[in-house]
Image (cartoon, coloured by chain):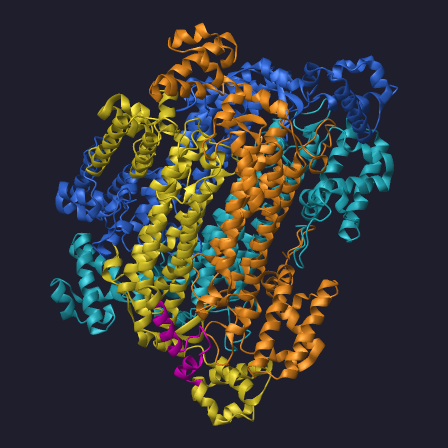
Chain colours: A blue, B cyan, C orange, D yellow
């Protein structure tokens, strides 16, 4: 953003200054430099192959673009606001480096198909980056799941302890979410993988270009089938952003849990020093800053999606300058996701679970009440709804006596249902409760171990 | 929504009234009735097959559920707010119809996995519904494309005429967008197609259930692998909503164009009377109401996505009551998309293009200037950037003389570039310009006809 | 929403059915009935006063409208979809009731200014409703603050205990937020309080109407100064929705805290039975459903704001049918806020704080470490940053010895800073820490009592 | 944003690098430098006045802060990422400049109240900046309104010509919108104008500070009344963002109109060269880039509001690190609004209306049909609904004969309503139609001139 507000500022020099400020995109679209060069090289090579430009010109262009790539990598490229955007900056520099041949590069091309190509390439890379980040997080979660397949913790509904589960089982829930997130990025990447290059301004071109050739050179599956669509479509960016939003929502849920678990009220985990901070005023604090920032960053993704969709709403075909507002939301969401995945991977890799604290919390809240109800159904053939009422009465009694369900004397239980016998105690302990949940996908440690094995193979 | 504000209102009777008002969902989740019955029948059949409930009970449950389905279809089902939600309404009615056996249906199940199952089934249907609606719209667009493969209209960038295209080509751009939209719904449908049923409250169950069996009966590909994930995941709803948002954005763009085209300023189309209205005060008006409403309805989808994502942000596992707020956004977006697709399909099926008006508009704005530049490049080997400058000067001259480029005398052209000769006129007419754009995906009628043929096969 | 998806559905009968479904608004805009009648009565009275219609006609209209109002109140009004919206429904009914005179009511008026007037009146009422709801919540919060001005609880940052505060002080923080929320609704109400009536379709009217008269009759401060603006402005609805969003955010924060406090991990409060529920499968649960729903409902408001803003984005003047999509978001957000305020008021009125549990939690986490640092600064003139380091070392030592700071032996403290003496213990207890924070707005019970007194006067 | 994705990148060095990347805010919060210094100076002066720090220390601090302010203004300040944020950067630099005294500045203060103070001061300035920008735009609009108070153009509903209005009247509609926008910023500025300083971390402080003193020094009306609220409130930022959103919506509407008007299909205006661009491929184009970018930038504001609200949703008190995500949305929206206002002001100041084209367009579409209906009501006492039908028949007849209404022969009119006489022609011309709309706020040039005079006085 060009307006410097730190010490005031303004546009005293009139409309020209305003126009430069609002129109110039080089400050952010420089991030498309690598993709722009990649696209231009493919385009020039094709033009030469098709005889549209001479081989010598094509060679000069290729070498010039390689030199520019090096300049950028080495931080020596002169980004200039007077050349407005990354495309014109590179073209202007190319002209300085190789002279007139540079003027032939734009043959049979427009900035409209050029920028669409660049952004698709960038988003394709960003999808791959997200996939890598999610995979890393899955592995960190899996390692915890492996270690804690049998570590009992309270399973919450409504943040009330409901039934005991294992910490490993809980970690695997996030492995599943990440898996679907990866699927969304893969689908987005596959769907966007068509080449707009050669659509020119909007209508195609009379030059005998070979769009299949440039598509292939750039790793696209095919050229896009409609030139108007090629330059005006931004659904690929929206789809990417929606995948970011959903993944960020998952991360915000995990982050919330980490904040809860790290609170002394829960005390389920110790966080790594590297991802926490102290306080400027309270020396005793160890704050889960990284988790809080991850929790917050879903706002960035949602803001990006909302913002870009608002931009695209009701835009007539084909290109409109409004679309220049597509890049910053994409970059912002990509950065936020990158950072969030890295932070959560570090967090899950380095946090230390506290099984004793987890188990102690699981004891609270009568988490085996459902097991009692199930026993009544299975052993005494009482309909579930009735069994549920009886179990509720047992809980009330245990609460009055201040004991766990497993410690409620048999005579107390028999006041509630005379047919109850001592075999019921086998299902009332935490360990029994957890071990009994052997249905597919259940929290029984044996099941969790199976799933750990499954994921080890998948993520190998 | 339960609060009646029409004539004031309130909650004079205290917290109980408030709780009923905020907690009750039967007014909207009744739309899950069919899915709830379908899920319960599959569950009961499995319970019997596994010996968890008796065959007689299972038969009674099945018949009772079928009776309830009929009652609902016939509008005779007693939806009752005191039973809070659709699940309890159906269970209560089942109890009235078949007595005690009804109490066994909820064995090895919880409302948490039940509602997750219901909503997945509903969203799966909604994806299919969206696919059908998009297909219908594609066909209507394709019919126009077929009819107008060669009808010349201005292709706009920045709402300025840029290069001539054909109306058929323009219609096909939307066929492409719809194709990707269908892909998104298909991916969402495939990804959500796992069964949460049997996850119970959150931890699985000790009953010897067969989750693969119920999954298969309900058309799911497999049971979900993690019970915590099964009851707490709503990414499937978010993904559906994001696909709605993106499709609605495409529809809003088409709607905007229809509003523009129907304006006397453009006059490109005549809209069907059935989808327009008159004015209460201005008798001469014919307003594109349906198109405007479609343009607006993207707000509904975006609101739904934004709203549900906000609900899910930072929710700890597993189930929280917040998730009850998942259904209304999904229903609202589905309804908006349904209506929008139906309206746009009707619009595209019935609008009458006005090729004469389109062609007249295309003549304005020197749309063959690019062709002149291209001719200079191709014929005189002038670098593109230089050719662009020369063409701009020709436009200025034509503008000064108030003629089209094709009518600019050769001596005028030669003042700009002496090597220009009369063969240039072949590229300066609208028809020549359009016909020349034969690159793959270009607007040349021959290309458009090819694409029409391609899509006829795809959409057959 | 008109599409019935419960058992399938569709628009087999073609565009007319689609148009009815998408265009008809009577299913939701019937909520404007009272405002529509109010507006029409004012308009008719003015028309008669200005001699534009006859007195007899005006009388007939007034009586007819009163009869309609009664019909609606008694649930006898025939809402008919063939009359599209509330305005035409009422006009059609009026025609049935009083005959030809009804046709004179629409003189010098259009649906454009009519609906703008209706919605402004409705939103003005909604602002008043929000104000009343917020006031009720403030009073409930204030009662808790009064009762617990001195009840010590941990003050959290990052959900880590930081410094002790009082529960009363915490409640008053929300009183402040509600106060600003009320200010926003008041400002919105004041700003929207201009009359669009008489702007007619968009350009004003040649009839000698008296807009100041109708404005006054409807409680508006003045007629709007520009007829185009009058019919096309919806910023008043957006401003109302933004105030709803911000208030809902505050409520979501309080709701989150209630969910936390009610969790056994905290145990700070007992929630009223009336606003909690049990579990269908876990008999021991007492779930904070109402709080969770309030936490979620911020999504509804944000969805409404986002949705309407998307509708309004880039709409050219004056009226466009897109604006029909303004009402449902407004109603949805208003309902959500109403319910949320009622639920939170009930919650705060009826929850029972558990001071013992709060105090116990406050003891954890060395909340008086800052007090130690402050003592070092004040008593020994050690710079704050240095004092902070010393306090941190004391915390580490206390942690190693598993004691509270107040129980750390003097010799241990002197190892850290030799000049420390026994007077330091006066600041290391929880009570001392809280009582010492007497700066304006601080948590010292004396200060909290002052603020309770201040608010009692304000809210009387 | 710290992650460099241009050429790949990553966090190979592990969690510490991740933490630096996600936690560091100096890259963006440096924009709070002036406010941070202002706040620190006020705090130090108060500490000295209250005897909490010595006068010599206070002097050293003040001089050091002034030196830092100069360093920043001159671009010499060493912003360092190792000092995380602007507060620690300034404090570290102060320590380098003045030694130990710097350590006393943080007495009785925390970063929590410090950053809340800084951001309030910044947003207060941003409100003033928005007000100035809106005022400039109002003046530019007013100048056009003055010039074109009588220039007839079509007034559109549904983008169909409805009734004729004047361009001046149209411009004044936006003056009204800007006026309400200014009101929203003024209200936001007034409401936020309370000082959080002295709330310390969250609970107040035991030091005998004078919060009223610092509040006054910083231009706040009063200190905030509750320390928890002071550090945890961000509704002021949300309210500012909502005002940005609504103002940006207005600007997007004006921008859309400019894009339409500049299209050859309308041809109502000529845009200044300074705010348009040419095409890289189409030499004849003159594109309304600035208007398109303004139209798009509403997405930025909405994204910012949505994003920050998502961050704040369900955050428990008091401070959480999530709130660090408050600044970038605020800066982004402020920059977008600044630029948009400057661009639209330039646009409205420099565009040239084309009254001839406007009038020609107004002739289309029978814009005086309403006048005919009104004449029938007023002259012949025909009820409005009936008159409307007759006027519609006249339009149909004129359309069939291809003439304007004013050119329809009297015998044709009499076929529709025999009592029609030649006096009707006085209301059927464009000029008569416009001049007749003399109701308050109507488009009659006399009325427009009155309003121009009113606004000249208001905006003087």
Give residue C78's position: percent from left, percent from top. Answer: 72, 67
D418 vs D343, nearest the viewer: D343
Q: Is residue A133 left or right of residue A263?
A: left
D231 vs B441, nearest the viewer: D231
Task: Indicate the quadrant where residue A390 lies.
Answer: top right
Total labels drawn: 0
Residue C380 in sight from this viewpoint: yes
Q: Is residue B143 magenta?
A: no
Task: Indicate the quadrant where residue A86 lies.
Answer: top left
Give residue A163's position: percent from left, percent from top. Answer: 67, 23
The quarter of the rendered structure image containing the C terminus of chain D is bottom left
Location of residue C192 with respect to D423 vertically, above or below? above
Give residue D411's position: percent from left, percent from top. Answer: 50, 94
Residue B182 in sight from this viewpoint: no
Q: Is residue D445 magenta?
A: yes
Q: Is residue A371 left or right of residue A39?
A: right
Query: What residue is rendered at 76% in x and 37% in y?
Result: B41
Give residue C59's position: percent from left, percent from top. Answer: 66, 79
The quarter of the rendered structure image containing the N terminus of chain D is top left
Query: What residue is rendered at 62% in x and 23% in y?
Result: C357
Magenta residue span? D428-455
* Residue at the extreme right: A418
Label the magenta part by its dominant secondary structure: helix
Query: What residue is rendered at 17% in x and 42% in y?
Result: A93
């Amino acid at each position: 953003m060009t307006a410097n507000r730190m010490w005031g500022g303004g546009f005293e020099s009139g409309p020209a200054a305003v126009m430069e400020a609002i129109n110039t995109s080089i400050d952010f679209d420089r991030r498309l430099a690598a993709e722009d060069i990649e696209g231009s090289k493919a385009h020039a090579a094709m033009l030469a192959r098709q005889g549209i430009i001479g081989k010598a010109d094509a060679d000069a262009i290729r070498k010039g673009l390689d030199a520019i790539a090096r300049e950028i990598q080495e931080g020596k490229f002169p980004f200039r606001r007077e050349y407005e955007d990354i495309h014109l900056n590179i073209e202007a520099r190319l002209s300085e480096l190789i002279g007139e041949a540079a003027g032939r590069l734009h043959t049979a091309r427009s900035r409209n198909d050029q920028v669409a190509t660049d952004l698709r390439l960038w988003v394709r890379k960003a999808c791959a980056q997200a996939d890598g980040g999610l995979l890393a997080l899955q592995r960190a979660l899996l390692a915890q799941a492996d270690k804690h397949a049998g570590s009992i913790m309270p399973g919450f509904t409504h943040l009330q302890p409901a039934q005991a589960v294992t910490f490993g089982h809980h970690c695997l829930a996030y492995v599943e979410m990440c898996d679907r997130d990866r699927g969304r990025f893969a689908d987005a990447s596959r769907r966007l993988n068509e080449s707009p290059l050669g659509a020119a301004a909007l209508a195609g071109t009379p030059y005998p270009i070979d769009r299949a050739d440039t598509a292939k050179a750039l790793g696209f599956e095919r050229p896009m089938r409609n030139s108007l669509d090629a330059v005006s479509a931004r659904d690929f960016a929206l789809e990417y952003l929606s995948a970011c939003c959903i993944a960020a929502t998952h991360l915000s849920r995990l982050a919330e849990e980490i904040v809860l678990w790290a609170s002394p009220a829960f005390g389920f985990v110790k966080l790594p020093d590297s991802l926490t901070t102290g306080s400027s005023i309270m020396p005793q604090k160890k704050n889960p800053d990284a988790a809080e920032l991850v929790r917050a960053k879903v706002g960035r993704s949602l803001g990006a999606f909302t913002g870009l969709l608002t931009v695209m709403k009701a835009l007539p075909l084909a290109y409109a300058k409004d679309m220049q507002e597509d890049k910053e939301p994409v970059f912002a969401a990509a950065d936020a996701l990158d950072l969030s995945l890295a932070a959560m991977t570090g967090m899950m890799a380095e946090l230390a679970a506290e099984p004793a604290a987890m188990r102690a919390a699981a004891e609270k809240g009568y988490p085996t009440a459902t097991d009692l109800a199930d026993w009544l159904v299975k052993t005494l053939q009482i309909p579930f709804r009735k069994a549920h009422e009886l179990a509720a009465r047992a809980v009330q009694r245990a609460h009055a006596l201040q004991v766990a369900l497993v410690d409620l004397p048999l005579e107390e239980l028999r006041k509630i249902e005379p047919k109850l016998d001592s075999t019921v105690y086998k299902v009332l302990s935490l360990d029994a409760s957890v071990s009994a949940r052997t249905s597919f996908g259940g929290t029984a440690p044996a099941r969790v171990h199976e799933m750990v094995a499954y994921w080890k193979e998948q993520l190998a």
